[in-house]
Amino acid sequence: MNIPMLDLSEQYLELKNDILKTLDEVMTSSRFILGDHVKKLEADVASLVNADFGVGVGNGSDALHISLQACGVTSGDEVITTPFTFFATAGAIVRAGATPVFVDIDPVTFNLDPLKVEGAITKRTKAIIPVHIYGQSADMDPIIEIAKKHHLYIIEDAAQAIGAKYKSKMIGELGHTACFSFFPTKNLGGYGDGGMVVTKDEDLAEKMKVIRVHGSKPKYYHHVLGYNSRLDEMQAAILNVKLPRLSEWNSLRREKASLYTELLEPLKEFISTPVEAEGNYHVFHQYTLRVKKRNELQQYLKDQGIATMIYYPVPLHLQPVFRDLGYQEGDFPEAEKASKEAISLPMFPELKPEQQQYVVEKISRFYNRA
Ligand SMILES: *Cc1c(COP(=O)(O)O)cnc(C)c1O
């Protein structure tokens, strides 16, 4: 049996007629940039997450960068975030001219540890970027409290967590802005790059809409330095077909996650399964274990036709490109440990129980338990 990390083909077959129809409409209309499909998706995503404004942008990385810029983050400023995330989180901070300040993670959820945030605040701190890693919300209440106390912006990196909840609030309504990615592999993925920022703040929304069109307002008059980063009309048209299905897909992911956890129960000695923190609605962008002998397990599964991924093998404070920040090994022991132990199993809404059984059978065999 060959089991990929993610298989988008079945979903496409199901949606094919609607997608081809909407793409045909876009091409027939000849309206390719910031048309009605982008407007509709902006309104619908904002409404889904209880925000008031959506700003469609080129990708999730730009969503972060544009958020930072709109919040006035600039050179000399510091932004607190987690070292255990995709590169783009910190990349956006540096692109905005600011300095990422990392704090360690909570080993249970892999998310920013709120207890460590306050100690990292200096006079230069402007914002905090909590990342809802793997589809589970960071512990937002204490983070919001700290941000209020120190007058900091919160920019949620929600690239992996569209549809997730924190204590009955939607991910996306908790920060000053929240950033989504529509990269094809995300829970709501387009057929190319795409992203969106949502906010309840009209002033921030307006700034971000100007930044994504070269800072142009009125047209051809530039008061701020923007660039070209718009959500493509064709991607928006596709995403409008997919968005109504998101909550169903997320609940299917949750079902797959429960089955994995149940099947893996006898392997507790070797494996820790994901923990959904109380009050969280995890949308399992990834189903990520902590395991013993991680790299050997990955190779073994690969030989059995099972794809797995390591998110993330190198925490950001140890990335060569960030050497000048001056961090060293040992600075964030939990993030470093996670980068050596984490492994993500195949996860997508169409994954079959037989496939999951096969995956777990092979994992059991690896640990000589079957
Ligand atoms: C995917 C991702 C991004 C970047 O999104 P792109 O659309 O690929 O630019 C940012 N942060 C996290 C945590 C992500 O997973």
Image: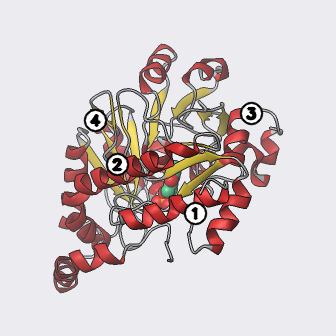
Image coordinates for residue 134, horizontal then vertical, percent: 48, 47
Tell me the residue that label 1 is attached to. Answer: 362
Disc 4 and disc 2 in contact, CB within 8 angstroms: no
Camera-nearest label, 4 or 3: 3
Image vertical order of residue 241 relative to residue 283, above or below: below
> Which residue type does callout 3 highlight?
Pro
Location of the C terminus (image quadrant): bottom right
Camera-nearest label, 4 or 2: 2
Disc 1 and disc 2 in contact, CB within 8 angstroms: no
Question: SS of the residue at dot 1?
Answer: helix
Q: Nearer the viewer, residue 139 or 122?
A: 139
Asked if residue 196 can be seen in this view, the reply is yes
Residue at image location 48% in from the left, 13% down from the top? 149
> Which residue type does callout 1 highlight?
Lys
Of the numbered discs 3 and 2, the one sitting upstream in the chain is 2
Image coordinates for residue 44, horizontal then vertical, percent: 20, 52
Cα separation, mark 4 vs mark 2, equals 29 Å
Question: SS of the residue at dot 3?
Answer: helix
Q: Residues within 10 Å of mark 4 (few under 14, many from 20)?
A: many
Of the numbered discs 4 and 3, the one sitting upstream in the chain is 4
Tell me the residue that label 2 is attached to. Answer: 254
User: Residue 333 has which mark?
Assistant: 3
Relative side of 271 to 287, left or right:
right
Of the numbered discs 3 and 1, the one sitting upstream in the chain is 3
Q: Nearer the viewer, residue 96 or 362?
A: 362
Image coordinates for residue 338, horizontal then vertical, percent: 66, 42
User: Residue 200 has which mark?
Assistant: 4
Of the numbered discs 4 and 2, the one sitting upstream in the chain is 4
Q: Quadrant of residue 13?
A: bottom left
Identity of the residue furthest to the front in this view: 370
Image coordinates for residue 45, horizontal then vertical, percent: 25, 51
